[in-house]
Image: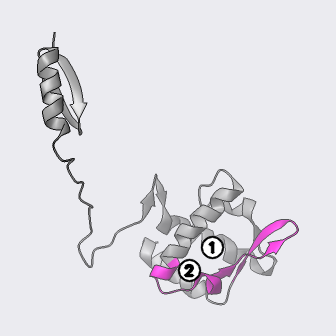
Amino acid sequence: MALKFIVHGIEVTATNAAEAAALIRELGNAPTPQRTAIRAAPGTHVMLRTKGFNVNYAAVDFLSLIRNAGDSGIAVSGLMPAVQARRPKGVGARAGMINKLLVELGFDPSQVYENPRTPEGRLWKAGPKMDAALEAVKRKANV
């Protein structure tokens, strides 16, 4: 009967317990292989993705909803579908990713939109640079 086990990500097969123990000792003392980070070549277009969440496309929907809400603003519950959030707290996490994209494009997120606290919760309103940021995000997402 063959014994199969994994050591440092390597599948090893031994014919008996003594051989298995020797292999484990030998492989256990070996340095753990380093994983190399995959880096994009300079000048290539990389879309940010997190578990099926595409930041570029979500940013277009997110910013469009805020802009179309006008001066009255939009509540967090209205933004949840745009950023694929299941809870209101998830909107804040996804907004952080969108903020990172805005900074990458040269915009200060506080100039693109504001989200002051109100007694009913946060209200998201367009800022002075909303239109320019939305156009830049659309170009990045190829929309």
Residue 41 screen position, x and y as percent? 23, 73
Crowd class of label 2 (few under 14; some 14 to 19; many from 20; radius 10 Å): many
Taking the image as drawn, is residue 81 in sight? no
Residue 72 screen position, x and y as percent? 81, 77
Which of the 4 image quarters holds residue 133? bottom right
* Earlier-in-chain disc, 2 versus 1: 1
Residue 28 screen position, x and y as percent? 20, 37
The amino acid type of the residue labelled 1 equals Ser
Q: CA distance from mark 2 to mark 1?
A: 7 Å
Q: Which residues are magenta?
A: 102-126
Residue displayed at 26% across by 62% down: 38
Foreground residue among 140 and 39:
39
Residue displayed at 77% across by 69% down: 122
The amino acid type of the residue labelled 2 equals Leu
Foreground residue among 23 and 15:
23
Q: In the rendered view, does 71 fall on the left or right side of 39?
A: right
Instruction: Give the residue at mark 2.
Output: 134
Residue displayed at 19% across by 17% down: 3
Taking the image as drawn, is residue 95 in sight? yes
Q: Secondary structure at mark 1?
A: helix
Crowd class of label 1 (few under 14; some 14 to 19; many from 20; radius 10 Å): some
Q: In the rendered view, does 31 fall on the left or right side of 87?
A: left
Residue displayed at 59% across by 81% down: 109
Q: Relative to 25, does residue 61 appear above or below in the rendering?
A: below
Q: Is residue 121 magenta?
A: yes
Instruction: Give the residue at mark 1.
Output: 64
Q: In the rendered view, does 99 fall on the left or right side of 30?
A: right
The answer to whether marks 2 and 1 mark residues whose Cβ atoms lie closer than 8 Å is yes
